[in-house]
Amino acid sequence: MLSKLATLILGILSEHERNPYEITKMLEYLQTKKWLPLADSTVYATINNLKKRGLINGRIEKTGNLPEKTIYNITPEGEFELQESITAFLSEDNYQTTNFDIGILLMHNLSKNEILIKLKKKLERLESTAFDIRKQIFGFERETGKIAFSSLAMLKHRLHINEAEIKTIKELIKELNIRMEVSELSPFDMRMVGN
C-alpha cells in the first residue's frame, strides 16, 4: 500500500497529466496541510520516488522562453497501485492513536489548571477550523455539479472528526471543572479492571 501522499499524487495524475507545481497547488487548494502535514519538498520527493518505482512517467516540456518543466502522467502500474491503495484505505479499520489520545492518557502529569488552559486553546482552534470547513461545505453545496461528490464527502468526514474532538474536549473541561484533582490512579492500571 502506498503512503497517503503518494496515493493523493497518483489520484491527481490519474485525472490529467501535470507538473509538480500544479500538483502542489492542487494539494494546497484541498487544504491537505490541515489533515496531512507535508512540505512542498516532500511532494517533490514523493514524485521522484513514484518515478523511480515506475508508477509515473515524466516528459520535459518547454514553452517559449519559459524554463523547462517536467510533466508527469500515471503508468498502468501506477493505476494498479492507486486502485490497491484506495481499496485498502476504504476497507481498513485504521484507528491510529493520535497525539491527542496520548495527551489525554497522560494528562494527569500536568496540573488541572494547565490542562484546562491547553484544552480551551485547542477548543478555540478546533471550533475555528470547524467553522472554516462548514463554510467550505456550504459554498460547495450551493454550487452543485461543480465539485466532486467524493471531495464533499471527504470534507464532511473531516468535519465529523473535528466535531468529535470538540465534543471530547467539552466533556473533559466539564469533568475537570467538577473534579478537585485530575486523578491519583495510573492510566496504565486499566489492565487490572475486570480481572
Image: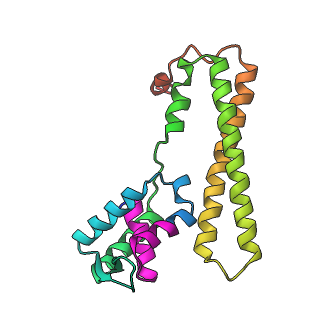
- Residue 16 occupies quadrant: bottom left
Is residue 148 shown left or right of residue 58? right
Choose between 15 and 156: the one closer to the eye.
Answer: 15
Choose between 41 and 36: the one closer to the eye.
Answer: 41
Residue at 71% from the left image edge and 34% from the top image edge: 171
Is residue 70 shown left or right of residue 97? left
- Residue 65 occupies quadrant: bottom left
Locate residue 122, reporting x and y percent: 65, 37
Residue at 48% from the left image edge and 54% from the top image edge: 36
User: In terms of secondary structure, what is the magenta stretch mainly?
Assistant: helix
- Which region of the structure is painted magenta? 4-26
Colour pattern: rainbow
Residue 19 within the magenta-colored segment of the rendering = yes
How many discs appear? 0
Locate residue 119, reporting x and y percent: 65, 31
Locate residue 169, reporting x and y percent: 67, 36
Q: Residue furthest front?
A: 65
- Residue 155 occupies quadrant: bottom right
Residue at 46% from the left image edge and 26% from the top image edge: 195
Is residue 107 shown left or right of residue 191? right
Q: Quadrant of the N terminus?
A: bottom left
Residue at 71% from the left image edge and 13% from the top image edge: 180
In the depicted structure, whether residue 46 falls above or below residue 108 = below
| Res 59 seen here | yes
Residue 159 within the magenta-colored segment of the rendering = no
Locate residue 78, reporting x and y percent: 31, 76
Is residue 164 shown left or right of residue 8? right
| Res 1 seen here | no
